Image: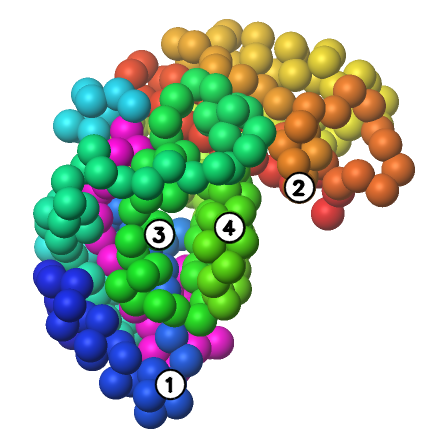
Amino acid sequence: MILFKEAAPLSKHISKLRDKGNSIGFAPTMGALHSGHISLIEKSKTICDITVSSIFVNPTQFNDPKDFEKYPVTIGSDISALESAGCDILFIPSVSEIYPAGIGKAPHYDLGEIELLLEGRFRPGHFQGVCQVVHRLLDIVKPGKLFMGQKDYQQCIVVKKLVQLLNLPIDVITVGTYREESGLAMSSRNLRLSKDEKLEAAAIFKMLQYIKENRTTNPHSTLENYAANYLIKSGFRAVDYVSIADAKTLQPTSAISEGIKRVALIAAFIGDVRLIDNLLLDE
């Protein structure tokens, strides 16, 4: 695995590989890697000739400065994990390398209503930050395929919108969520949970399954309220949302509609750690 810290030599190296006919797959990360991240590398390797990954904790997508400060950093083990997984190229840039004109100079993206729903509502500016860093990384790497995890369901939709807005010839491939034995979705933020908190946090997946099992016999609002109350009783400090939504638009749905596939999404706090998860209901 070749490690780059600067954009220009990375772009030049990848350009040479592309000119030789190699297809390029890209899996951007913020580090603190787990099996879900590694699955993106493994998926890319089955489809693409060259697999590129990046580690960059992007400051512009954190609306809470304390969350940014506490984000886990495990760079040594991350490099080892990527090398073991067969990643070909790793990019570890500085903030100035990603934002050479400064953070305040990044463009604004017209994402439409998707930016205002769910995560967008509770984390103002978050998706602008996501698009800023993804746009920059895509401009540097210029992959043919971009690999993202389903756990960040809304982010996947936003990035697909970004690729469409920029008219880029990139396929965005979503890879299924990896879970711990308890059902808890693997997340870098899980490193901040105690053993007991991890057990309590598994209630999120339990409620997603409950919603899926009861989706045809109960109004959506009833299921959403039940799940939110259950999480609070199970040790969660607060619930930002429990939503049953259109799987394409994330607009809320009130009942079963023929032809519309749905997804259940949850965001809730265990202590000061905010966790998100989702489950497709019609698959």
Residue marked by disc 1:
22
Q: Give the range drawn in magenta.
A: 39-62
Q: How dense is the environment of label 3, judged by Cα within 10 Å: few (below 14), some, or many (20 and up)?
A: some
Q: Where is residue 73 in the image (x, y as percent from the top left)?
A: 15, 42
Between marks 3 and 2 in the image, the one whose residue lies nearer the viewer: 3
Judged from the image, the secondary structure of the residue bearing numbered disc 3 is helix
Q: Residue at x 15, y 68 (%)?
A: 8
Magenta-colored stretch includes residue 58: yes
Q: Which residue is drawn at 30% across and 33% down?
A: 61
Q: Which residue is drawn at 66% across and 41% down?
A: 248
Q: Where is residue 132 in the image (x, y as percent from the top left)?
A: 32, 44
Q: Quadrant of residue 113?
A: top right
Q: Can residue 147 be seen in this view?
A: yes
Q: Can residue 202 be seen in this view?
A: no
Judged from the image, the secondary structure of the residue bearing numbered disc 4 is helix
Residue marked by disc 4:
165
**Mark 4 to mark 1 CA distance (whole Å):** 26 Å
Q: Which mark is residue 248?
A: 2
The three-letter amino acid code for the residue at tag 4 is: Leu
Q: Residue at x 25, y 58 (%)?
A: 54
Q: Position of residue 244 (x, y in %)?
A: 67, 26
Q: Where is residue 234 in the image (x, y as percent from the top left)?
A: 48, 13
